[in-house]
Image (cartoon, grey):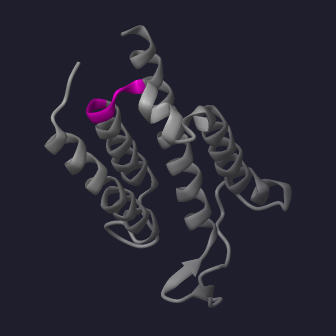
Amino acid sequence: MSTTVLTRLVARLLLLPVLITALAILVKGYVNPGDGFSAGVIAAVGILLQYVAFGFRTVERRLPLRFAPLLSLTGLLLALLVAFLPVLRGAPLLTHWPPANVEPVHLGSLELITAMAFDVGVFLIVFGFSLGVIGAIAHTW
């Protein structure tokens, strides 16, 4: 498959804005605290655009995508930790911290709460899985 210079240029120029958009949606989403699933899909589409424009082998050399399964595993462990850690303390499943009457720690306007950690876990699962599937399909071509 051959692509034009313009296609490769546009793909190269769009990668960073797509990843920044995914990060913005992860952090703030449509409603606080974020949207890990949508952010993971958007980031994966940005990488898919690179595969289409440059080809599988070139993208694999330029980006560390071989770690996609590790991203999924890390995300799964993080999401499970957020979900089940409260159970070990005697609280119901997915009880978030801090409680409603406690002011959370802020990093700028970002609230550091367990819901945000759960969204990061979901993002890593979706992004890693999507890259793995895209890579598996690309290997068959």
Q: Position of residue 140 (x, y in %)?
A: 41, 8
Q: Nearer the viewer, residue 131 or 113?
A: 131
Q: Quadrant of residue 87?
A: bottom right
**Tally of marks:** 0
Q: Is residue 45 left or right of residue 27?
A: left
Q: Quadrant of residue 76?
A: top right
Q: Position of residue 127 (x, y in %)?
A: 48, 42
Q: With respect to residue 37, does 21 lie above or below?
A: below
Q: Position of residue 72 (x, y in %)?
A: 60, 38
What residue lies at 40% left-to-right and 18% top-to-bottom? 138
What residue lies at 59% left-to-right and 57% top-to-bottom? 118
Span of residues in magenta: 52-56
Q: Is residue 123 left or right of residue 77?
A: left
Q: Quadrant of residue 55?
A: top left
What residue lies at 46% left-to-right and 69% top-to-bottom? 27
In the rendered view of the protein, which quadrant contains the N terminus? top left
